[in-house]
Image (tube, rainbow, N blue to C red):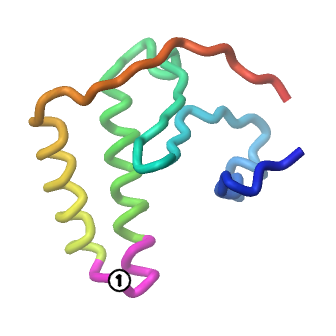
């Protein structure tokens, strides 16, 4: 049964075509609030890898914004960087949650 109130993105081609792929992060905006789920064990060996992942995502966002004609890639990346630095430097967000199980398909 599908829920028409929830819009999900497609699985990326590279992940779909890979011999092995692991989803590590998913984010939704629901009623104006951010809802995320991720596997905290993904980079258990080096938590700083989360920073690299977020950096790579920022580059993908900037490139997509440029491809969409919204602004130049360098402008988009600078805007994302400024917002990230403001967010990281701000008071911690109110968050709740728990470690959930993994889903096997």
Left or right: where does residue 86 sit relative to residue 36?
left
Up-down: is 93 above or below 63? above
Q: Give the position of the C terminus as an image quadrant.
A: top right
Q: Point out the residue furthest to the front here.
A: 31
Q: Give the position of the N terminus as an image quadrant.
A: top right
What residue would you read off at disc 1?
70
The span shown in magenta is 64-72
Left or right: where does residue 32 sit relative to residue 77?
right
Mark 1 Cα shell of 10 Å, populated few (<14), some (14-19), many (≥20): few
Q: Residue 58 location, x and y as percent?
A: 34, 55
Up-down: is 55 above or below 23? below
| Residue nearer the viewer, 26 or 45 | 26
Q: Is residue 16 magenta?
A: no
Q: Residue 39 location, x and y as percent?
A: 54, 22
Q: Residue 48 location, x and y as percent?
A: 30, 25
Q: In which quarter of the image is residue 47?
A: top left
Q: Residue 72 location, x and y as percent?
A: 27, 81
């Amino acid at each position: 049964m599908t829920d028409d109130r929830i819009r999900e993105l497609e699985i990326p081609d590279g992940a779909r075509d890979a011999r092995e792929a692991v989803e590590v992060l998913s984010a939704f905006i629901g009623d104006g609030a951010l809802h995320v789920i991720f596997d905290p064990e993904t980079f258990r060996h080096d938590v700083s890898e989360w920073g690299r992942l977020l950096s790579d995502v920022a580059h993908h966002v900037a490139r997509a914004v440029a491809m969409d004609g919204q602004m130049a890639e360098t402008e988009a990346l600078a805007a994302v960087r400024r917002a990230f630095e403001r967010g990281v430097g701000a008071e911690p967000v109110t968050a709740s949650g728990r470690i959930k199980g993994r889903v096997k398909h």
